[in-house]
Amino acid sequence: METLTKGEKVWVAYATENQQFHIELQFSQGMSIADAIAQSGLAEQVKLPESFSFGIFGNKCKDMNQLLQAGDRVEIYRALTINPKDIRRNRAKANPVGRYCRGNRYRQLLSK
């Protein structure tokens, strides 16, 4: 059995709320993003959103037919479940730090 070097494979990455997938595939010349997603079998393992964004190493792509290079990681992005600003507001509400309130660092020092 021959071993693969880093340049002879590509990966497909996707994360659900409960599970992460990082699937390794054999690279073939002329492979597109759509080919990599189809070969990964990800659609059989989880329900992919009807319309999803995708990219290569964090750079969003618009065309599913974009060709891949050896060593690329195809990432499938899903919509956010909560706005990051709302997360921060909720955290600030739960841990108030203000003019007349001691901060979280003070609480950490007291608990030691």
Image (tube, rainbow, N blue to C red):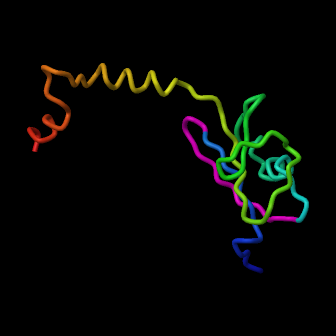
* Residue 17, position as x, y percentages in the image: 56, 35
Front one among 59 and 112? 59
The quarter of the picture where residue 10 lies is: bottom right
The residue at 73%/36% (across/down) is 53
Left or right of residue 83, residue 112 in this image: left
Which residues, given as a range, are shown in magenta?
A: 16-28
Give the quadrant of residue 81. top right
Magenta-span inclusion, residue 25: yes
Q: How many marks?
A: 0
Please state if 48 lies on the left or on the right of 39 as rendered. left
Examine the rendered structure and indicate whether residue 100 appears above or below residue 58.
Answer: above
The image position of residue 21, as x and y in percent, is 63, 49
Q: Does the magenta stretch include residue 75?
A: no
Residue 88 vertical position relative to residue 20 in the rendered view, above or below: above
Q: Which residue lies furthest to the right in this view?
A: 30
Residue 36 in the image, given as x and y percentages of width and height: 81, 52
What quarter of the picture does the N terminus occupy? Answer: bottom right
- The residue lying toward the viewer, choosing from 95 and 98, is 98
Residue lying furthest bottom: 2
Q: Residue at coordinates 66% horizontally, 52% vertically from top-left?
A: 57
* Residue shown at the point (18%, 30%) measured from the top left: 103
**Residue at image x 25%, y 25%?**
95
Which corner quadrant holds the C terminus? Answer: top left
Furthest residue in direction front, as rendered? 99
In the foreground, 28 or 68: 68
Q: What percent of the width, then of the height, locates residue 9?
A: 75, 66
Determine which quarter of the picture holds residue 29.
bottom right
